[in-house]
Image: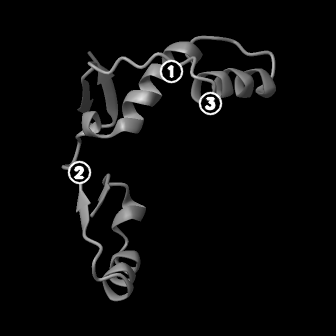
C-alpha cells in the first residue's frame, strides 16, 4: 500500500493505470481531500516556516544554509501536536 495526498500528478490516469498493470500487488490509497494534518510534510513545512517567515536573507546561500541546518542537521523543532486546518487555498495552523 502506498498512501498519497491529492496532488493532481498523483492522480494522473496514466500513472495509476501503469501501476495497476505493472505492479498489481501495489494498492494506492489517497488522503481525504483537504486533510493536511494527515500529511507529515505539512507539519514539517509549517514548523520550518516559523524560522524562515518574515526574515530578510542577504543571499540565497544564507537561506539554503538555514534550511540545511533545520532539515538535515536536526535543528528543526516540530510541533507534533499542532493541528492544521485547510480553508480553501489558505492553510491555517492552530
Residue 66 image point, x, y percent: 68, 20
Residue that label 2 marks: 31
Q: CA distance from mark 2 to mark 3?
A: 27 Å
Check if mark 2's residue and mark 1's residue have beta carbons within 8 Å: no
Residue 1 image point, x, y percent: 27, 64
Residue 11 image point, x, y percent: 33, 66
Q: Earlier in the sequence, mark 1 or mark 3?
A: 1
Is 77 displayed left or right of 43 in the figure? right
Is 55 displayed left or right of 48 in the figure? right
Residue 47 vertical placement versus 29 (above, below): above
Q: Residue at x 32, y 56 (%)?
A: 4
Check if mark 2's residue and mark 3's residue have beta carbons within 8 Å: no
Residue that label 1 marks: 49
Q: Residues within 10 Å of mark 3 (few under 14, many from 20)?
A: few
Q: Earlier in the sequence, mark 2 or mark 3?
A: 2
Residue that label 3 marks: 72
Amino acid at each position: 500500500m502506498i498512501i498519497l495526498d491529492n496532488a493532481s500528478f498523483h492522480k494522473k490516469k496514466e500513472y495509476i493505470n501503469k501501476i495497476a498493470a505493472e505492479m498489481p500487488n501495489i494498492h494506492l490509497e489517497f488522503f481525504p481531500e483537504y486533510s493536511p494534518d494527515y500529511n507529515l510534510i505539512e507539519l514539517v513545512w509549517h514548523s520550518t516556516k516559523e524560522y524562515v517567515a518574515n526574515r530578510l536573507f542577504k543571499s540565497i546561500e544564507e537561506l539554503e544554509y538555514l534550511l540545511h541546518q533545520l532539515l538535515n542537521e536536526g535543528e528543526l523543532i516540530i510541533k507534533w501536536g499542532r493541528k492544521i486546518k485547510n480553508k480553501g487555498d489558505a492553510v491555517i495552523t492552530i
